[in-house]
Each structure stands twice: as C-alpha cells, then as structure tokens.
C-alpha cells in the first residue's frame, strides 16, 4: 500500500501507532458481502436498500428479471455472473439477500449469498491493468 507506520512507546503509558497512508488511498464505508468463496466490499454510498427475502420473493424478482423499489426498476443480477463467472450458482438458503444499488442514474439489483456486515475499508486504485474490469473500482486488504 505504501505509506509508513510510526510507533511511540512510553513506559507505563502505552504505545501509540500512527499510520500514514499515501494520498492515492481512500477510506470509505462499505458493506462486506460474500458470493461463493469470495468476499466483496460494496461502497455504502451506492446502497439504496438491502432486501432480506424468502424464496418466493426472490423467485418473483428473478422471473421479472428486475426488482422495483420506490417506483424505480433495478435490473437483476447474481454478483458472480455480473463479474463473468457464469458457472457460479447461488447458494440455497431460507433467506436471500438482494442489494439495490445506484450510481448516478444507473440502478441494479444484486443478489449475494451472504451479508457479512459494515466496515470502514482502505481502497487502493487498481491501476490501468484492471481498470477495464467492469464493476471493479479498487482493491482492499
């Protein structure tokens, strides 16, 4: 990632760690999700709604190939399929997660296998090699 760490220890007072991150990094709030064996971080600013659905509700969205929320259509996708893994199959559960995302005027309903929770993450630009990958904005550790 670059940057540096400063450690300052004082007897009977404790230790202070200072992390200095380069300006090419950004800290953002994200929702961590899992699909298959991979984990992903979805920027919190893109999330309009998280739907916790039973199988019947998910089937309705799949058949319509879209979710409708607040009068707006959200084209439906399973996350691994959107990233090119067309062989991946959604896991069977008693509840299903669909994220309603928006970036500018574009909207999408994204099915994931599990919602792991919220976290602040450090995002690094992925460089020109991966910049062409649709749906990927950065990398985090």
Image (spheres, rainbow, N blue to C red):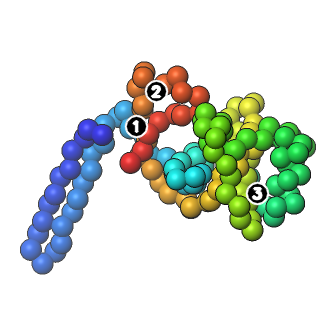
- Which image quarter is the N terminus in? top left
* Residue that badge 1 annotates: 124
Residue picked out by circle 3: 51
Q: Secondary structure at mark 1?
A: strand
Query: Which element type, helix, strand or loop, lies under badge 2?
Result: helix
Residue 56 is at least partly visible in this image: yes
Q: Can the viewer see residue 45 in this picture?
A: no
**Residue 123 sits in which quadrant?**
top left
Q: Position of residue 134 (x, y in %)?
A: 59, 28
Residue at 73% from the left image edge and 41% from the top image edge: 77
Local crowd size for mark 3, using a 10 Å CA cut-off: few (<14), some (14–19), many (≥20): some
Whole-angstrom CA distance, mark 2 to mark 1, is: 12 Å
Q: Residue furthest left?
A: 11
Label 3 and label 2: CA atoms lie apart by: 30 Å
Numbered tag placed on residue 130 in the rendering: 2
Along the polypeptide, which appears first: circle 2 or circle 1? 1
Give the residue at x 75% y 68%. Answer: 94
Q: Position of residue 110 (x, y in %)?
A: 70, 45
Which numbered mark, 3 or 2, is in the foreground of this view? 2
Q: Determine which quarter of the picture holds residue 101.
A: top right
């Amino acid at each position: 990632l670059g940057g540096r760490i400063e450690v300052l220890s004082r007897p009977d007072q404790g230790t202070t760690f200072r992390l200095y991150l380069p300006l090419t990094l950004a800290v953002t709030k994200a929702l961590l999700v899992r699909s298959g064996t991979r984990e992903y971080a979805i920027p919190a600013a893109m999330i309009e709604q998280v739907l916790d659905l039973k199988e019947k509700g998910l089937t309705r969205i799949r058949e319509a190939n879209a979710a409708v929320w607040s009068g707006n259509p959200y084209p439906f996708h399973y996350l691994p399929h959107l990233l090119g893994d067309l062989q991946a199959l959604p896991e069977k559960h008693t509840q299903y997660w669909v994220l309603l995302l928006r970036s500018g005027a574009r909207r999408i309903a994204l099915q994931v296998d599990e919602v792991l929770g919220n976290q602040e993450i450090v995002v690094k630009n992925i460089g020109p090699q991966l910049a062409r990958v649709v749906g990927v904005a950065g990398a985090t550790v």
